[in-house]
Image (spheres, grey):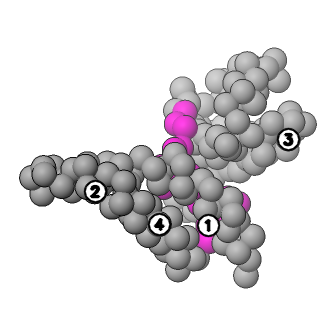
Amino acid sequence: MPIHVAITRKVLPGKENEFKEALRRFLGESFLHGGVHGAGMITPLPGDDSREIGILRTFADEAERDAFYDSKFFKDWEDYAATLTEEPVYRQLTGLEAWFRASGSPPRWKMAIATLCGVYPTSLFLSFTIGPLIQPLPQVIRIFITAASMVGLLTWVVMPQITRILKKWLHSQ
């Protein structure tokens, strides 16, 4: 299952252009590492005073992510980038933000349909499997158990499969 990582770096004043150029080269060269499936840079809008640069990176799996971050190529980049930025913040994306991760987000109506394709069968599955087991519990607890089960199944099982199956449709014009 693909692994998505978001990195935020705050560039030191006056180093913005140098960092952006170096990052463009690094992102392009990083595809030589076989497990890198995607990488992109998110910059502030023109006229925005923010010096934060976002980087989204997709790996084939956890092993490829770890191999990339343990590589000399990445460590050399980190050493260089540390001279141009403050300490980076790394976050692995695992929830809704990762379901639709791509070079461009699909239209909201397509994301809604894809989500419905995951929520509807999952809610049916839960109502038939855990529904009878939790029926004697108070309604507030039943709803909590159902919601927690729904979120877990959608996040780690259902939506990664839905977005993989619907990938071409989600990103078509």
Q: Position of residue 153 (x, y in %)?
A: 45, 50
**Which of pointers 2 and 3 lies earlier in the amino acid sequence?**
3
Indicate the amino acid at tag 4: Pro
* Whether label 2 touches label 3, CB < 8 Å: no
Q: Is residue 58 magenta?
A: no
Residue 71 placement (x, y as % from top left): 79, 20
Magenta segment boundaries in residue numbering:
90-106
- In the image, 104 versus 131, the foreground residue is 131
The residue sitting at the right extreme is 32
Residue 70 vertical position relative to residue 16 in the rendered view, above or below: above
Q: Estimate the spatial distance between the alpha carbons at disc 4 and disc 3, rounded to whole Å.
A: 37 Å
The residue pinned by badge 4 equals: 121
- Mark 3 nearby-residue class (10 Å; few <14, some 14–19, many ≥20): few
Q: Quadrant of residue 26?
A: top right
Q: Which residue is mark 1?
A: 105
Q: Tags 2 and 1 in contact by the CB under 8 Å rule? A: no
Secondary structure at badge 3 equals loop
Q: Give the spatial CA distance, label 4 vs label 1.
A: 24 Å
Q: Residue furthest left?
A: 138
Judging depth in this view, the residue of 25 and 5 nearest the camera is: 5
Side of 45 where 123 appears, left or right: left
The N terminus: image quadrant = top right
Q: Residue at x 9, y 52 (%)?
A: 138
User: Which mark lies nearer to you, 4 or 3?
Assistant: 4
Amino acid bearing label 1: Ser
| Residue linked to disc 2 | 131
Q: CA distance from mark 3 to mark 1?
A: 21 Å
Real-space Cα distance between discs 2 and 3? 47 Å
